[in-house]
Image (spheres, rainbow, N blue to C red):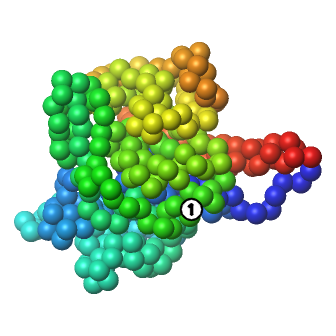
Amino acid sequence: MARSKRRKRIVIIGGGTGLSTLLRGLKKFPIDITAIVTVADDGGSSGRLRDDYDIPPPGDIRKVMAALSDVEPLVEEMFQYRFSQSEDLAGHSLGNLMLTALTDITGDFSHAIREMSRVLNVHGTILPAANQRITLHAELEDGTIVTGESKIPTYKQRIQRVFLTPNDVEPLPDTIKAIQKADLLVFGPGSLYTSILPNLLVQGIQKAILQSKAPNVYICNLMTQAGETHNYSAADHVRALMVHMGAPFIHTILLNTDEVPLSVQKIYEQEQSRPVSYDESQLKKLGITVVKKDIATIQDGAIRHEATKVAEWLVHYAEDREEAIKQQSI
């Protein structure tokens, strides 16, 4: 039976470098991409603009825009340019300032994203997890409550849970529609508690994911993260996701099989970070299908997901799931 010619609708939920890296790979394929991006950042340029203009922080959105844009390299470099010489502008990126200006002009952050996406010829749709300013909090193992996404990892304690204020923030209607129509929902890669979970704490997004009939894939991080996932196994990552969602929802986990070179491991040891370990039996007990692939690459001493390999697997996975459903209906 021939595969469907309809472009697959893939929704990716996350933030940070991991999300933008994956999107650079996905935009090479003929699919419909929607990126739902965290707006919990409160540090650096994003945090300053968030406080000064009472808007969602633009930094993660900017990175995703650059990843999905189709413009001359010089234009992308300009959009990502970070000022360093001016005392007033130091630390700000041009893209952050442009998104802030457009939000101030239009009065709407999501409208600013749409307009800037047109300017940058973005492949796909970029949606903020919330269209207003929110704050991320964490309750640590000893009961301490930490306020602010940028402060959470600095406490170096095990995190019991994270939560948002306001807790009744509403997602954009377009976000819910994208999840409802998705052929595949993808979570990660990215910081578990500060990039992925803030999206899932928006109640409307959480409800839509749990009601979705699309397969859910979690792309596991390659390395643990000090202050967030110290000594976490792959199963620990999944359990944290499930606890915060209140139900099992991950169908498949994608793991890296490639050994991290010892020279690279030693660099990460200085940051109290190590390769994420996994026990297949533990993951299967959680009802998850385990997929293992060589999907890592080393760049300037840092280990990253090889975006094209991951993207290619995701596209094939979506196609294979659709084909399996068709076969079952015959």
Residue 54 versus residue 155 in the image, above or below: below
Residue annotated with mark 1? 178
Secondary structure of the residue carrying numbered label 1: helix
Give coordinates of residue 261: x percent, y percent: 45, 23
Foreground of the two, 20 or 37: 37
Give coordinates of residue 151: x percent, y percent: 18, 42
For image coordinates 19% across by 68% down, the residue present is 54
Query: Relative to residue 176, is residue 169 drawn left or right?
Result: left
Give coordinates of residue 270: x percent, y percent: 25, 25
Q: Give the mark count.
A: 1
Furthest toward the bottom, the residue is 105
- Residue 122 in view, yes or no: yes
Give coordinates of residue 32: x percent, y percent: 63, 63
For image coordinates 55% across by 45% down, the residue present is 210
Residue 283 versus residue 206 in the image, above or below: above
Furthest toward the left, the residue is 87
- Residue 13 in view, yes or no: no
Task: Specify the quadrant of the image occupied by residue 217.
Answer: top right
Q: Residues within 10 Å of mark 1 (few under 14, many from 20)?
A: many
For image coordinates 38% across by 34% down, the residue present is 301
Query: Relative to residue 45, is residue 326 drawn left or right?
Result: right
Residue 119 versus residue 67 in the image, above or below: below
Foreground of the two, 161 or 33: 161
For image coordinates 30% across by 39% down, the residue present is 162
Q: Mark 1 belongs to which amino acid?
A: Ala
